[in-house]
Image: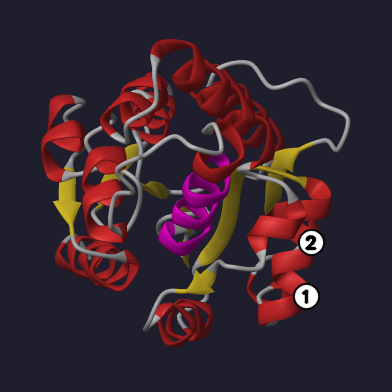
Amino acid sequence: MLRIITDFDGPLMDVSERYYCVYLDCLQQTKLPAHQIKQLSKAEFWQLKRARVPEVKIGLISGLDQEQALKFAQRRRKIVHSLPYLIHDRVIFGVVETLEKLQKLDIDLVVMTMRREKELAAAFEKYNLARFFKSDRRYCLPNNYNKKTDTEDKLALMEKALSELPPAADIWMIGDTEADIVAAKTHGVKVIGVLSGIRDFERLEYYQPNFIVNNFSEAANLVIAKVSSLT
């Protein structure tokens, strides 16, 4: 059995508009009424975000003072994954067709995300994605879970999945962050970083995934090609 484990946000979903809307709202809610700020364009903001520039620094770059920047970062952390903003996410072009292709090839598909159960369920329903992932192939956070760090949470999800899922001859992870790469490599799973998400090439390269490609479709085709070459 060939198994592909994929993160949700980044490989499958474009989250850039959600993150930018949160940035704009937090900026407006944090600044003083007469305060002149430098509102970043979406391209400018996303470049900083993908380079993992801290939220406080993004606030400072946007013209907030130190105290405002701290409030900006705290507010952003509180709401960025909330349901009112998740409506801005969109399925990345080519993802559905690629998932259909993998399903036809009888590849075992697993989704592993730091979304909470209700957040994943909402996206599955809105975009009809549940058909690709059986109920026991969905690894996410409980609704009442107190998040730790991204890496800690993703490591725990990976450990849980590998302990529960049936054995597979070959397992690949597709993700867009250092948390995905660390979780996969810690457990001996081959991992492909994709550039369609929240980290740029330099950030992904630092953590040394097996491969880095542009998007989920390219990653899936790479897995198929690698597996085919061994049979």
Residue 87 falls left or right of residue 37: right
Location of residue 65 in the rendering, given as x and y in whole percent from the top left corner: 39, 18
Q: Quadrant of residue 141?
A: top right
Residue 129, given in percent of the width and then of the height, sits at: 65, 75
Left or right: where does residue 117 sit relative to residue 194?
Answer: right
Q: Decide which of 208, 165 is in the foreground and name it.
A: 208
Q: Residue furthest top?
A: 67
* Image vertical order of residue 177 relative to residue 70, above or below: below
Residue drawn at (27%, 65%), measured in percent from left and top? 215
- Residue type marked 1: Glu
Task: Check contact, mark 2 vs mark 1: CB within 8 A.
Answer: yes
Q: Is residue 72 above or below residue 3?
A: above
Question: Where does the magenta region start and end?
Answer: 16-26
Task: Check disc 2 and report its element: helix, strand or loop.
Answer: helix
Magenta stretch: includes residue 92: no
Residue 19 covered by magenta stretch: yes
The residue identified by callout 1 is: 125
Quadrant occupied by the C terminus:
bottom left
Reading the image, the residue beneath label 2 is: 121
The residue lying furthest to the right in this view is: 144
Residues 223 and 33: in front is: 33
Work out whether residue 162 can be spotted. Answer: no
Q: Amino acid at mark 2?
A: Ala
Measured along the vertical axis of the image, is residue 117 above or below residue 144?
A: below
Tell me which residue sits at (79%, 61%) in the image.
121
Report, in whole angstroms, how far the alpha carbon at label 2 lies from the one at label 1.
6 Å
